[in-house]
Amino acid sequence: MSRNWRDRSSGFWDEAGQRRLRAGVIAGLGAALAIGAMEFLSVTLTYPLAVIPFATSIVLVIGSPEATPAQPRALIGGHLVATLIGLMVVNAVGPQPWAAALAVGLAVLAMFFTGTFHPPAGINPLLVVSLNLPWTFIVAPVLAGALLLAAFAFVWHRGVRRQDWPERWL
């Protein structure tokens, strides 16, 4: 039995396993730094962290930078499109529970149509409608945060990982 366990675990210690481990450690460090910066800005600007919709975007952009939803068009555009849909819905019908569901569904549809599909942005219309957030939410934290995250990812991937990112901007 122990031999079988060793046979299955040996792939972890081979060269490919060590590369995966290094990549995971680097991605974890990058995500931690980005989240730390987000927390710092939240405290500094006295903006509630619970309303900043970027934690899952950070994980995606840092951990899977080659994925289409991790590219700047999807990252920035997805957050803007989803937030705009949420703002339009909440201003049209108010902060109703069914309106939050409708806003998320419409945001997914809009992201597909605009080529900006970014799954983490699905939280934006939910936040906007549930918390009845103002139009300024689209500027700060959404636009400002998405641009800062794209800049962080660019520096992180090029400077630390020494890899090209993004694959394309638009």
Image (tube, grey):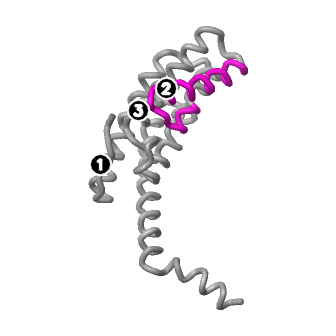
Q: CA distance from mark 3 to mark 2?
A: 15 Å
Q: CA distance from mark 1 to mark 2?
A: 30 Å
Badge nearest the viewer, 3 or 1: 3
Up-down: is 68 above or below 161? above
Badge nearest the viewer, 3 or 2: 2
Residue 30: name its quadrant: bottom left
Q: Earlier in the sequence, mark 1 or mark 2?
A: 2
Q: Which mark is residue 76?
A: 3
Up-down: is 78 above or below 60? above
* Residue 118 located left or right of residue 126: left
Badge nearest the viewer, 1 or 2: 2
Q: Which mark is residue 87?
A: none
Q: Which residues are magenta?
A: 97-123
Which residue is painted at 61% across and 86% down in the image? Answer: 6
- The secondary structure type at the circle numbered 1 is helix
Which residue is painted at 37% across and 38% down in the image? Answer: 72
Which residue is labeled 1 in the image? Answer: 155
C-beta proximity under 8 Å, tags 3 and 2: no
* Residue 121 located left or right of residue 155: right
Residue sitting nearer the eye, 126 or 49: 126
Which residue is labeled 2 in the image? Answer: 113
Q: Residues within 10 Å of mark 1 (few under 14, many from 20)?
A: some
Q: Position of residue 9 (x, y in %)?
A: 58, 80
Q: Earlier in the sequence, mark 3 or mark 1?
A: 3
- The secondary structure type at the circle numbered 3 is helix
Three-letter amino acid code of the residue under disc 3? Ile
Q: How many marks?
A: 3
Name the magenta segment's main secondary structure.
helix
* Residue 129 located left or right of residue 29: right
